[in-house]
Image: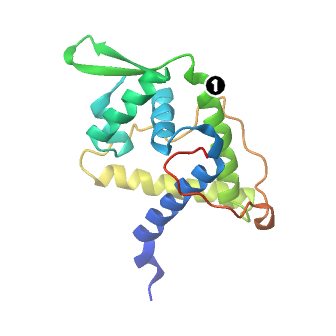
Amino acid sequence: MNRLRNFGFLLKDVSRLSGLNFEREAVGLNLTLAQCKVLIYLQRNEGISQVRLAERTDTDPMTLVRTLDRMERDGLIERRQDPADRRARRLFMTTAAEPVVAEIWRIAARARAASLAGLSPAERVQLVSLLERVHDNLTTLVPGAEADAPLCPPPEQAEEESPPSIAELPARRTRSRKLSP
């Protein structure tokens, strides 16, 4: 069978498994994966509208509203009136969210290192480079795709340590909706 036929399925499954791996690493964070995504997108896009955030995170708008309601109650985000459109709300992280975001990045680095275990540093760079080229192709081909969507972590994000070997990886898995016990 032609292995290229599996391209889309493989990308989707790698994304799914990557999310599950992040959840496994983030058990004690007491946030859902969706909440973590919101905070990372807000860090990169302060003042984004709720509609645009729903598009960027590929989240149903009503589901996102419930997620944002909880995060606002928890003091992690704030909604502000859009000065140009009284119907729209803009989203901002609070100061209280900053250490949470820093912890999300630390967890993401661990999860990424585990995902890339067994690949040399050159292979990891090559993999990301190739995926960036595929991303560029798709943003050109897909009407309405946003080429300006940020892909890179913030500049202060340090390079991660060498990935662990497969033998060093934890074996447990969790599939709970919450990232805490």
In the displayed structure image, the side of residue 28 where residue 19 appears, left or right: left
Give the residue drawn at x 31%, y 29%. 50
> In the figure, 3 relative to 169: above or below?
below
> In the figure, 74 relative to 175: above or below?
above
Question: Which corner quadrant of the image does residue 67 belong to?
Answer: top left
At label 1, which amino acid type do we have?
Pro
In the displayed structure image, the side of residue 36 where residue 120 appears, left or right: right
Give the residue drawn at x 29%, y 20%. 89
Question: Which corner quadrant of the image does residue 157 belong to?
Answer: top right
Residue occupying the far bottom of the picture: 1
Q: Is residue 26 visible?
A: no
Please provide percent x and percent y for residue 3. 47, 81
> In the figure, 93 relative to 178: above or below?
above
Please provide percent x and percent y for residue 142. 28, 53
> In the figure, 49 relative to 1: above or below?
above
Residue that badge 1 annotates: 99
User: Secondary structure under badge 1?
Assistant: helix
Give the residue drawn at x 73%, y 56%. 121
